[in-house]
Amino acid sequence: MGTSKIAMLSGIYLILGMYTVSFTAADRNNSSISESVANSIQAEQIARTGISLAMTKMGGTYSLATRSYANQTASVMNGSVVYSASQSGLPVSQSQVTSTGTFAGKTITVKAVFSYDRNRWRLIRMYVPPVA
């Protein structure tokens, strides 16, 4: 009878040990996924900051220099952003800004279309890719 108790307790300890190992692995996996998503969200926020910086650069003036310009780079919130404006394929009063934010190895690109109306640039629409 004593050996059957030892065998039963050994089996219970083995099962508990396997659960503990499985929970630890799942916890590490969840932590890794959470960190990846958080870094992607931070990269998106940095890209949105680039859209705001582009709007500031465009200001209230309507000229070729504000409708279209090459890459501008800035360091923001421990990451970086590159933004540019282009008018190709759009009506004369519109401009498309592309902003790419990078944070901890994650990169997100946001695109926005601006329209010049009533002496200022207005945001018409913005495309933000889903965070994966």
Image (cartoon, rainbow, N blue to C red):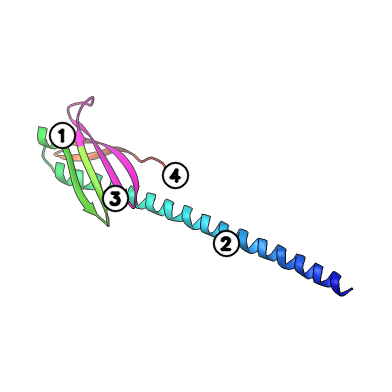
Q: In which quarter of the image is residue 115?
A: top left
In magenta segment, residue 94: yes
- Which circle's residue, 1 or 4, is located before the other in the chain? 1
Is 13 colored magenta in this rendering? no
Part of the protein shown in magenta: 85-114
Residue at screen point 29% across, 38% down? 111
Q: Which of marks 1 and 4 is in front?
A: 4
Q: Are marks 1 and 4 in contact (CB under 8 Å)?
A: no
Residues marked 3 and 4 touching at CB (< 8 Å): no
Q: Name the residue under label 1.
A: 67
Rendered location of residue 35, percent (x, y): 43, 55
Pick the residue in front: 13 or 100. 13
Nearest to the observer: residue 15 or residue 31 = 15
Question: Residue 76: x, y in percent?
Answer: 24, 54
The crowding category of the residue bearing disc 1, from other C-alpha atoms within 10 Å (few below 14, some 14 to 19, many at least 20), is many
Q: Which callout, 2 or 4, points at the residue further toward the start of the chain?
A: 2
Observer-nearest residue: 40 or 27? 27
Residue found farthest to the front:
3
Task: Give the SS element for disc 3.
Answer: helix
Q: Residue 132 carries which label?
A: 4
